[in-house]
Image (cartoon, rainbow, N blue to C red):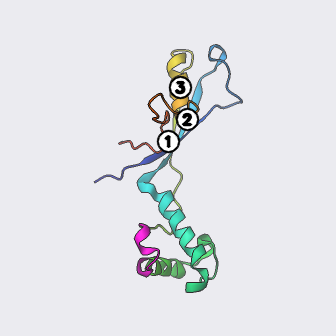
Amino acid sequence: KFPRPSAQFRASRVGGPWWPVADMPNSRVFLDIDLDSHREKYQRARDFVEATDLRYGWTSKDIAELGGGEKQRVVECYADDFDWGSKGPIEIEPAAEERVVIELFDDKAPLAVENFRALCTGEKGEGKMGKPLHYKGSSFHR
């Protein structure tokens, strides 16, 4: 079974601000990918360490500053903790940066590029039926 990635989309143009469609050079869209919700799990572990610092006697409130043995103890204490254990799994190491770069050919299909960029940035807000007009949090497969 493959992990279901959740994408955090961010559009960016190299070289400056957004230009009118007719004047646009080719732009790029960067898709930051969170495989198997790793960032969310790591944030949960960070919150756990910060909140239970006194209870478990961590050497730091920042999980990144804990040693290897202490990080393993975080996993064990989290699983046994009555308040935190049911909140979902945790990861004790930050996720590697996962990024896909898509080059958009503004000169070939300016309207399609503008629509795709708007879906990546979420600048259009919500549609008529109240559905969000963005890709943020969308799952995709390979």
**Which of the image's four quarters has the N terminus?**
bottom left
Q: Residue furthest front?
A: 129
Residue position for label 2: 122
Mark 1–mark 3 Cα distance, whole angstroms, equals 19 Å
Q: What residue type is labelled 1?
A: Lys
* Residue 34 can be seen in this image: yes
Q: How crowded is mark 1: few (under 14 residues within 10 Å), some or many (20 or more)?
A: some
Q: Which mark is residue 136?
A: 1
Q: Which of marks 1 and 3 is in front?
A: 1
* Numbered disc 1: secondary structure: loop
Mark 2–mark 3 Cα distance, whole angstroms, equals 17 Å
Mark 2 vs mark 1: which is more N-terminal? Answer: 2
The magenta-colored residue range is 79-88
Was residue 47 drawn as part of the magenta stretch in this picture?
no
132 in relation to 66, above or below: above
Mark 2 vs mark 3: which is more N-terminal? Answer: 3
* Residue 103 can be seen in this image: no
Instruction: Tell me, yes or no, whether the two marked residues, 2 and 1, touch with CB atoms within 8 Å.
Output: yes
Q: Looking at the picture, tell me which residue is in the foreground, 137 or 18.
A: 137
Q: Looking at the picture, tell me which residue is in the foreground, 1 or 50.
A: 50
* Numbered disc 2: secondary structure: loop
Instruction: Tell me, yes or no, whether the two marked residues, 2 and 3, touch with CB atoms within 8 Å.
Output: no
Residue at x-position 70% and y-position 30% = 15
Percent coordinates x, y for residue 9 in the rendering: 53, 40
**Which of the image's four quarters has the C terminus?**
top left
Q: Residues within 10 Å of mark 2 (few under 14, many from 20)?
A: some
Residue position for label 3: 104
